[in-house]
Image (tube, rainbow, N blue to C red):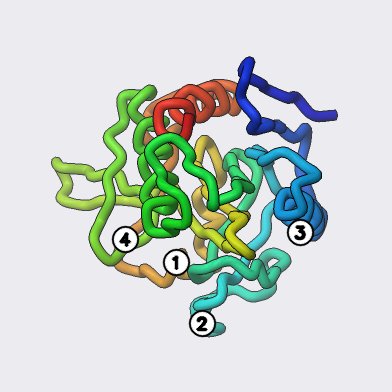
Amino acid sequence: MTERLSTPGNTIEWDIGDGLTAYPDALARMTDRVAAIRAGTARELVWLVEHPPLYTAGTSAKPEELTDPNRFPTFAAGRGGQWTYHGPGQRTGYVMLDLQKRHGSVPPQDIRCYVNGLEEWLIRTLDRFNIKGERRQGRVGIWVADRARGTENKIGAIGVRVTRWVSWHGIALNVEPNLAHFGGIIPCGIKEYGVTSLADQGIPATMHDADMALKAAWDEVFG
C-alpha cells in the first residue's frame, strides 16, 4: 500500500511507500520509471521509502571503506558517491525528474544546479524543525554543527544518477535510524566526522512529520 500526494496542476507524482522496500525492488522500479519518463509515458516521480538495514556502494566507493562487510547486505547502487547506509528510521527520497525541463529555481540541463537544489530541499526541510542544516565545501551532504563542542555531524546524504537527462536516486534524511548501524562503513568516505538525526538532535519527529516537511520544502525549491 502506498500514499500518494498531489497538488492541483502539478505534474509531479508523490508516492510514499508503506513498510520496508527491498533495495533491488527500488532499483528495478527506478529503472523502469526513468525509461518511461524519458519515453513520455509516465509522470515525473518523487518516491519516499524506508529500507531494511543495508549498505550501498556508489561509483566511487572503495572496498576498504566497507569496514564490516558481514554486518548487512551490500548493493552496487550505480549512483555517484561512495558508501551509504539505509535503514528503518531514515527517509530515502528517490527523485525522478526530466532535467531537460525547468523545475522551480533549477534551470534545464544543469546537473550542478540540480544537486544544489537537492541540498536546498534538505536545508529547508530541516529548518521546519528548527535545525540549521549547512553545506560544506568538499563534503557531500548536509551537516549540523555543534558549536559548543566544536564538532559537526552529517544528517542528510545526497547521491544522484542522471540517464539521458532523467534523474534518479536522490537524498536520505536521518529521522530516527539506529546511528550505530553507520559503523560498518566510512560514510561517503569521510571518517573525521560522525552522523546525526532529528531524534539525536532532540526532535521527536515521526516519519509522517518528515514527509510533510519534505513536501512543503520541495514546493519552495522545485515547485
Q: Which residue is mark 2?
A: 62
| Left or right: where 179 falls relative to 125 | right
Residue type at mark 2 is: Lys
Q: Crowdedness of circle 2 by 10 Å Cα count: few (<14), some, many (20+)?
A: some
Quadrant hosting residue 84: bottom right
Q: Which residue is mark 1?
A: 188
Alpha carbon separation for disc pair 4 and 3: 33 Å
Alpha carbon separation for disc pair 1 and 2: 10 Å
| Left or right: where 26 falls relative to 178 | right
Residue 40 x/y as whole percent: 75, 47
Residue 216 x/y as whole percent: 48, 22
Q: Which residue is mark 4?
A: 193
Q: Which sits earlier in the primary sequence, circle 3 or circle 2?
A: 3
Residue 143 x/y as whole percent: 32, 48
Residue drawn at x 44%, y 58% as measured from the top left: 111
Residue type at mark 4 is: Tyr
Q: Which residue is mark 3?
A: 31
Local secondary structure at mark 4: loop
Give 215 or 189, whichever is nearer the viewer.
Answer: 215
Visible in this render: residue 200?
Answer: no
| Left or right: where 32 falls relative to 130 | right
- 4 or 1: mark nearer the eye: 1
